[in-house]
Image (cartoon, rainbow, N blue to C red):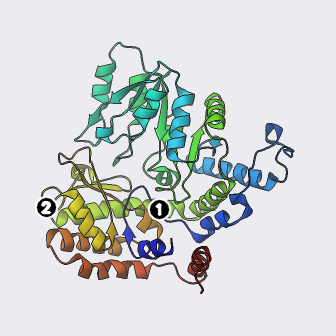
Amino acid sequence: MASHHEASRDRLHLVPSENGLSLAARLPHLTEAAVRYAFPGPDDGGENWAWPGRQDLVAVEQDTAMRLGTQLGAQYVNLKPVSGVSALTVALSALAVPGDAVFNWAERDGGHGSTRFIGARLGLAMKDLPFDPAACTLDLSRLTEALGDEPRPALVYLDAFMCLFPIDLGGLREAVGPETLIHYDASHTLGLIAGGQFQDPLAEGADSIGGSTHKTYPGPHKGVLATNRPDLAARLDEHASHFVSHHHPADVASLAVAVAEMDERGRAYALRTVANARRLGAALAERGFTVCGAERGFTDCHQLWVDIAPLMDAEAASRLLFEAGLVVNAIPIPTVAAPAGLRLGMQEMSWAGMGEAETDEIAEVFAAVLRDKQDPAAIGKRTRALIEAHRSTGAAEQVLRVGLAAASGDVL
């Protein structure tokens, strides 16, 4: 564990599905909250004498839900899901019944790999949303044509874990009509939505929103569901209560810290994340790389997609960058013909406070290692210099070192 910690902190992580977690947000996992159950009393009021002495933990959860709801524009927030896939499972179960037609992204078009499996196991008739490779988003004209005079689906589940640009939710609502439920899985963009960037799903036409809290949202590995409809809130809560026996007070307390941090700096962080992503897209394109979405400014969120096939295999590129201290995804890309491209995320470096200069230096490292074939180990010194300039030091790092030493039995 200690060796992983030390090695990981010497790398710059550009994986879109990860983020940093402050020391304050890590501390709840060292407290009694990590080993206790916490259930509210009847009607969420008064002591629960089956599980007494937990009211302070319940209060933390209620306050966190309220504050996160304010960030997301949601009146009802459910913190029972323990992960993004947990939230996905609850949403599919609560919002559709066996036999219902449910549209979602095909995995080849950036849909989450678990959605079809879970939907099929729940007895749902899963169908493809049409994808427009030129626009890198939903093809509304093809969807309208495909629906024709057929009955509208019960649910549209927007589960893009590969995303660059917002979805036209108003156009989608017009296409499917008022009765179809639209659930927006914001696992990747939750922090940008909370920070006032990308889009505002509940205001634009989605009935509910959900996802994980550790990608662009800089919180623990946990899940959330939210809506402004009391009927849907009741359904989501009923199903969440059966799919999740207990939702871990330490994770809730950790999320509470992240919510407070986002209240303080979320808007500036979200704005910087998108600006850094667009700047890196332009900088890589200037250096000869094929960056997807160039006609639309490369991205409107934290993700960038790079077609690295003209230079080399994506996995080879990922290995070289790793040797240079940069961690990226080699993964299938919807608009790339090769088996895989590079998927980059700018949220973690942005949360750490990096900006234009650091983004330009990252582009230089890419060019030196992948284009100019320079020794990645030597180029790694430049990556480490970026990390050192923004490294967490002082009391916070000392607490982590003491904890790691105690866990491994080392003598300080």
Q: Answer yes or no: do the residues labelled 2 and 1 have beta carbons within 8 Å?
A: no
Q: Quadrant of residue 228?
A: top right
Identify the residue under disc 1. Answer: 19
Q: How many residues crowd around disc 2 within 10 Å: few (fewer than 14), some, or many (20 or more)? A: few
How far across and down, in percent of the image, does residue 160 sit?
38, 42
In the rendered structure, which disc, 2 or 1, sits on the residue that comes first in sequence?
A: 1
In the depicted view, which residue is nearer to us: 41 or 77? 41
Can residue 304 be seen from the camera position used here?
Answer: yes
How far across and down, in percent of the image, does residue 208 sit?
54, 36
Q: CA distance from mark 2 to mark 1?
A: 29 Å
**Residue at image point 67% right, 64% down:** 28
Q: For this view, does 129 lie left or right of residue 286?
A: right
Q: How many residues crowd around disc 1 within 10 Å: few (fewer than 14), some, or many (20 or more)? A: many
**183 up-or-down from 321: above or below:** above
Identify the residue under disc 2. Answer: 311
In the depicted view, which residue is nearer to us: 231 or 325? 325
How far across and down, in percent of the image, does residue 275 sit?
37, 62
Can residue 205 be seen from the camera position used here?
Answer: no
